[in-house]
Image (tube, rainbow, N blue to C red):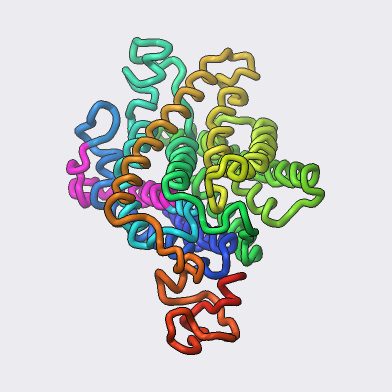
Amino acid sequence: MLVSASLVLLMTTPGLALFYGGMSRSKSVLNMMMMSFSALAVVGIVYALWGWSMTYGEGEVAKVFANPFDQFGLNGTAPGDYVFVAFQMTFAVITAALISGAIADRVKFSAWLVFVPVWVTLSYFPLAHQVWGGGFLSGVENGLADLMFSGDGGAAVAPIDYAGGTVVHINAGIAGLVLALLIGVRKGFGKEPIKPHNLVLTMIGAGLLWFGWFGFNVGSIVFVDGTGGEADLTQFTTETGLVWLNTTLATCAALLGWLVVEKIRDGKGTTLGAASGIVAGLVAVTPACGNLSPVGSIVLGAVAGALCALAVGLKYRYGYDDSLDVVGVHLVGGLVGTIGIGFLATSGGLLYGDGVRQLVVQVVVALYAMLWAGVATLVVGLAIKYTMGWRIDEEDEVEGIDFAEHGESAYDFASTSGSRRGLGSPSPATSTVTEGAKA
């Protein structure tokens, strides 16, 4: 599990940082990568202080979250749980980091640093407790599934979220949508091309995400009952092998599904489409990887790749600036995976002749997660908007957020003019000049 935790950590830095950084413009790549690295730093501390306690501690409040002070600072946490603490911490980290892609190029770094700890406290930790910590969205007595179908405490049809379709991807996707609407579009959005500056970085990042995702999914060994012995070992081997295969097959199918849509629609399959298809498949199979057959995973991945490829264009139709397609990939992919379980689960799935109850539960859980994340994000987003403010100055946005927020640039460009700050010819190591800003 420590190896899996390290793999999930790799997903955020450098995996997601490179994936998002390459998709950004050259004048904002450093800021984009800093948002991932800072999310790791902030959430890591917060999780140890009260995140673990809110998710898995005692003193549950209305089946929504546990007492944040029960094991504050891991005080009272059994040393034997430290490995699980480490693993769960990395999930919280990457969920927060994913949101940054929706608001690239235009927000104050200080606003991001304030948003992250408050958001994980109000949105991530409660949802994680409700799904994985024995709360309202699990199969417990008087939980959502129990109230819907049995009412006897048995939860005849329990919600399924193996590794984070609701907790991670729907959560982050809705947060990205709310912030994109709240903060507004980048200057030039919809009027001029805003293209990725380095797709090589994006492809490397996608590869690292795929590699790290095996820690994400295969490491979530929640199915072993812990009784020990040969039966446990056999179950462990069977289930982890299935999860590995399902994760791989769904991702392969999603990559191809995305490229097929691009070929039909645009005439060419792109490297950006391949990288995005990889992530779409990984997102979709995350909640379902332990409950599908290999063939079912291929079907799920292909559907996710195609639908996400279509969904990323909705921002131009409806005018919300989801800069790096967090909504199109993570929200839509998370919904495809979470709801797809109701059709494709080998036990409980509609297509396996087990009726609609699992499907109904999955749909209701997905809607609940969207509502919870949306309200929590709106509260935090509005508080920041009307206090410290989200947006950098328009002039800084044009010049480049890297220099405005960090005093640096990612690349050395030949200087042909003085900087707008009246400092003469700027040092290429510390400034982004006009040609670089236009890239």
Quarter of the image where the C terminus is located: bottom right
Q: Quadrant of residue 253?
A: top right
Left or right of 316? Residue 8 is: left
Observer-nearest of 350 and 404: 404
Q: Is residue 42 left or right of residue 266?
A: left
Question: Which residue is located at x 36 percent, y 50 percent?
Answer: 89
Q: Position of residue 434 (x, y in %)?
A: 56, 77
Left or right, 268 with reference to 80: right
Q: Position of residue 268 (x, y in %)?
A: 79, 51
Give the main secondary structure of the magenta stretch. Answer: helix
User: Residue 1 lies in magenta, yes or no?
Assistant: no
Q: Nearer the viewer, residue 30 or 75?
A: 30
Q: Which residues are magenta?
A: 67-96
Q: Residue at x 46, y 35 (%)?
A: 166
Q: Quadrant of residue 285?
A: top right
Residue 241's place in the image compared with 131, above or below, is below
Depth check, front residue: 272 or 167: 272
Residue drawn 32% across the image and 41% down it: 379
Relative image position of residue 91 (x, y in whole percent): 42, 48
Q: How many marks?
A: 0
Q: Is residue 308 visible?
A: yes
Asked if 389 appears above or below 31 in the picture, the reply is above
Q: Residue at x 54, y 53 (%)?
A: 323
Q: For this rendering, which residue is in front, 95 or 29?
A: 29
**Is residue 68 highlighted in magenta?**
yes
Whether residue 44 is visible to the viewer of this picture, yes or no, is no
Residue 57 percent coordinates (x, y): 25, 38
Extreme bottom residue here? Answer: 424
